[in-house]
Amino acid sequence: MRDLFEGLELGKATRDAYGEALRDLGHEHQDIVVLDADLAKSTKSWTFGAEFPDRFFNVGIQEANMVGMAGGLAMAGKVPFISSFACFVILKGFDQLRMAVSYPNLNVKIAGSHQGISVGEDGTSQQAVEDVALACSLPNVVVVVPADEHETRAVVKAAYAHHGPVYIRTGRPSAPLVHDSEPEFVFGRAKRLREGTDLTIIANGLLVGAALVAHDRLAEEGIAARVVNMATVKPLDVAEVESAARETGAIVTAEEHLLHGGLGSVVAQAVVANHPVPMEFVGLDDTYAESGEPAALLRKYGLTAAEIVAAARRAIDRKGAVAPDRVVG
Amino acid sequence: MATRLRHHIVHMLARAGSGHPGGSLSAVEFVTALYFGGFLRYDPKRPDWRDRDRFIMSKGHGVPVQYAALAEAGFFPVEELDTLRAIDSRLQGHPVYGTAPGIEASTGSLGQGLSIGLGIALAGRLDRKDFQVYVLLGDGECQEGQVWEAAMAAGHHRPDNLVAIVDYNKFQLDGAVEEIMSIEPLAAKWEAMGWAVREIDGHDLVQVLDALEWATAATGPACIIGHTVKGKGVSFMEHENRYHGVAPSEEELTRALEELGVAAADRSIDADAAGAKEVQ
């Protein structure tokens, strides 16, 4: 993985930061209860469970019941954080999320770990690539994809402070650090990590690191790319998207998810509604992946800085307003 | 009171022009006993009271009987029953959390109420509250896998404050439960999941009250299987599965109310609204 994120330090996996942040919050707030469906050692919810066994329920391998129980716990005043792999809690628990969380707008926090294809060798059945689209389709649910361990800690705290359902998506591998320390975090407010005038790269999760690498490579070609970490997919920071469109004239989105219904789709909706400009999309194009080493999968399925750079060139070509000497290759 | 609830059910469904009379009528004695037999601790002026007992209608299509009981208990005016299923009404076609006071969960997608009830029961245990949670399930609903996930989890965690009631009226939308997908041996299934089980005649109020007393006092989760008759109390609806999801016409309403011993004249319905529309 390290060579995919040249120049960036690798931090902890976001799932590790989730477990630690949850444990720390557990000391402060007695109303937090945590549920897992027999993946607590993998989702890292066990970091909480080991410390607070009375407030930790391992429901076994039954995601639908876990989601329903969380709804009941929230109705009775608890703040349940429920964890499983993203593909299981969102896909197997979807109707329950609809009936027992989203529709009644209950204070349930859903943590889906093992996002995207960087799950690696376990293969497609464990790799969530549809979960953001599904979560975004649920009314009332905030959907957030933190990029690194620092941001994940801030997101977990913000999720507790927010009254209502939140979906937090975390990942399995070590994630490149894109923040120096724990950032201020507000749902629906993007973070501009690099300034630029020629185009904007909007990314979240693991792809924020790739976007920063792409920024540096584009700079070597004389292209000034703005980089925006759009951790919150819903509610979207429409103002930041509009600024990107108006001020840089082209947008590339990058996400570890299917192109249909994910970050690229919601950003495109905002761009078209406010200030249409050329857009290019980095993500999974209507395909599942396979087993393999995470970095090899990310390369094979085009979720790398190199793909973002190529998409940036295409977007700038379509924009047609950049001086020719600034477009290389 | 059971007769009054039946009267409200057929009347509000005729007014709405759609809905599920059969599965409401079969559950009348259970709902009557819970709300008016001294089991549910509630305060209609404080529907959000933290220490209240909870009743969850997991078989959400049976909600008319719950609306009728809530109205009689004073949660909202009896006249509001006539707004069932109408636009802007608090009385949604299936129960919706946060709409009508006294409705404890959003259901209607079958199989989910017991999980929610288990969550509430465990929260009560964590907080050392003494409230009880009663969940009413349909027999066909017991075909849903999630029911058994929740039953297994309750058998494991063994909350003393959780009671499941199965309204075993023998029919589901497409026909007889036994022919479509038998749920037998039902009592053995609940016992295998770690529940105390009692089987009764779900229309015999003495048996119902006795079973509820037993279940409420039981250690660990308890299940009451109530053998019932779909459409109970209205002769032409009894054992007649056509009335799973068809509201009575005005003529049928008049007959039903006559049988129930209530004059229809004082609550005549709008003929246009009484057309029997079939819904799921």
Image (cartoon, coloured by chain):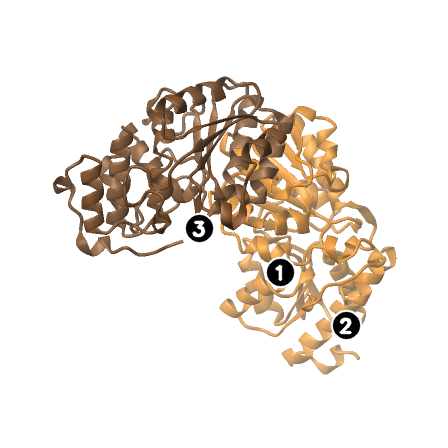
Left or right: residue B98 versus residue A207 is left
Looking at the rendered structure, the kind of residue marked 1 is Leu
Position of residue B253 measured from the top left corner of the image (x, y, whole percent): 21, 46
Q: Quadrant of residue A41?
A: top right
Residue at 17% of width from left, 51% of height from top?
B270
Q: In which quarter of the image is residue A161?
A: top right
Residue position marked by numbered label 2 in the rendering: A222
At mark 2, the secondary structure is: loop
Looking at the rendered structure, the kind of residue marked 3 is Gly
Furthest residue to the right? A3
Q: In this view, does B227 lie above or below B210?
A: below
Looking at the rendered structure, the kind of residue marked 2 is Gly
User: Which numbered dot is residue B175?
Assistant: 3
Q: Nearer the observer, disc 2 or disc 1?
A: 1
Chain letter, colour brown in render: B
At mark 1, the secondary structure is: helix
Q: Mark 2 lies on which chain?
A: A
User: Which numbered dot is residue A263?
Assistant: 1
Q: Mark 3 lies on which chain?
A: B
Q: How far apart are marks 3 and 2 (CA)?
A: 72 Å
Residue at 74% of width from left, 34% of height from top?
A46
Q: Distance between the residues labelled 2 and 1?
A: 27 Å
Q: Nearer the observer, disc 3 or disc 2?
A: 3
**Quarter of the picture holding the C terminus of chain A:** bottom right
In the rendered image of this protein, which colour is used for chain A? orange
Residue at 78% of width from left, 64% of height from top?
A304
Residue at 59% of width from left, 50% of height from top?
A143
